[in-house]
Amino acid sequence: MKTKICLWSALLLTIVVTSCREESDVLQSYAFDDKMAFEEAKNSYAGKFKVLWKALDQNYGIWDYERSYGLDWDAVYDEFLPLYEALDERKDVSDADLKALLEQTVAPLHDGHFVAQMHNHQTGNYVLVSPSNLRVQKRDDYGITENFTPHLEAYYPVEYEGNGDIVEGMEAGTDVVTLLSDVYNNPDKGYQWAKAELVRLAELPTPTDLETFRIKGLISFITDMKDLLSRTLEPSTIVSIYNQLVAIYDYLEIPGLEPINSNFATYGIKVKYALFRNNVAYFYLSDFSLSAYLDDSAVPEAFPGANAKTIARIKTIRAVWQAWFDKVQSLHASGQLRGVIIDVRNNSGGMFADYAYVLGSLLPSGGIDFGNLRFKRGLGRYDYSPLSPFHFKTLKDTHSTITEPIVVLANCRSVSMAEITALTCKNLSNGYMVGKHTHGGICGLKTDHYDYSTDYAGIIGTRNETPVWLYIPVGVTMDNDKNIYEGIGVAPDIEVDFDANLFTTKGRDSQLERALQFLSTGH
């Protein structure tokens, strides 16, 4: 009898444990039925965890890859559900508490684009975790590359007599920081003009009522602009606040105080072109948004109703890219091109279509097969589609194929399209990568809600609205040898540390100089 009781107890325990995981043969459409999907999660940490676990179980695309690292997703459920249930017993759950537990939960996941957000219903705040950022932040080159933008001033012949002398150069920027810096720093307009005007009016011995009114307005404007500059906000929020200030202080008639097209928050970009001595053509881009400027059919969609100022800014980006492209082509045609450098350091990725204008502008027309793609195609954890070729379009306009060496500069903050550019360059017979390991996030994305019945992946919930929000890539990207680079990144052919002290004190760039040395000497 005692044996039977033990057997029944063991069986009951098994039933209880396995039934905790809410298996389902119906795919939950998180995009279109929020009430059903998130009801329990509104006021329960355990409910939030169940949404996260189930959504990933049915939508995450690289479970076989995670299995190779020893991750057991069922074991994660059994380990972490009690920890979230324990939070439900407390009345003092801080944002730090919730974030720490969420970090522990998703830290083992390798997908470089995956992001998880949970709402702390006790505080009303949201906590956001990126497993890949947690991983990359541990690298020794992470901190020193924060806010990095290449500076080329030290390489002008008048200041530096080395192999990196610039023969010519151009740059332009439409990112929010660049556009606002003009408002802040230009002495002839905006913030600096307002300060000078305030000083002039304050020195008047007997200001009129109108002048006194302007003094008060200028003081208020300067204060608001300083406050905006000091805050850390999303680019779209910065543009929104700035445009409100433009409307509020329009009566002051401050030169250069004009609205910024809000789409520059999405498609803003910095680009630089330089022709170094020995005819090395250099091109830098901060983000892959070139298509929004270079593709005539894309411009109206990216910048609908663009005014003259916006059109002028679009033309400056076009001019920089065109100067680089034309110089590469002309030097190649005359047999004088020594090599090409494409700088994607700190580039966070962007549009697939940009490939045609960057590396694709150096390759034959007709496109290039990067590798393979697959998708989630069923409810089972390992239900994947067959592999299909991942094809990138190259530039279709008339151009020559560049046979001289091509170098891509990349670092730990090079993500997504930046990594694809580095990897495809490495696979060329004349292509090389210089710098440090990239971020490790190459899987394909889609950024809107769409039909889960066909794609089985994507965005779960709505950011800053639903109790859980997840950002899951739709496609798994592999190279031609079926290798996945999530959480690992692309390894450079020539590894070079970024010398932050050299950059700060002398403006010189150790990674750029190593690329120039390689193109000059071949080693």
Image (cartoon, grey):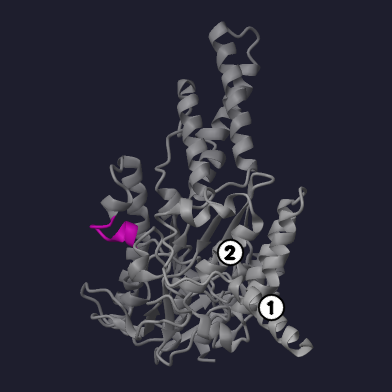
> Gap in Å between the C-alphas at discs 2 and 1?
20 Å
Q: Nearer the viewer, mark 2 or mark 1?
A: 1
In this image, 486 relative to 17: left or right? left
Magenta stretch? 291-298
Q: Residues within 10 Å of mark 1 (few under 14, many from 20)?
A: few
Residue 10 location (% of width, % of height): 70, 83
**First in sequence: mark 2 or mark 1?**
1
Residue 5, compared with residue 93, is above or below; it is: below
Residues marked 2 and 1 touching at CB (< 8 Å): no
Residue 492 location (% of width, % of height): 55, 84
Amino acid type at circle 1 is Leu
State yes or no: residue 297 in magenta.
yes
Write the residue at 42% across / 68% down. 27
Residue 445 location (% of width, % of height): 42, 68
Residue 64, compared with residue 348, is above or below; it is: below
According to the picture, the residue beneath numbered tag 2 turns out to be: 50
Q: Is residue 137 visible?
A: no
In this image, 451 relative to 132: left or right? left
Q: Is residue 398 visible?
A: yes
Q: Residues within 10 Å of mark 2 (few under 14, many from 20)?
A: many
- Res 438 quadrant in image: bottom right
- Res 256 quadrant in image: top left
Callout 2: helix, strand or loop?
A: helix
Residue 68, compared with residue 221, is above or below; it is: below
Callout 1: helix, strand or loop?
A: helix
Q: Which quarter shows the C terminus?
A: bottom right
State yes or no: residue 466 in magenta.
no
Residue 223 image label:
none
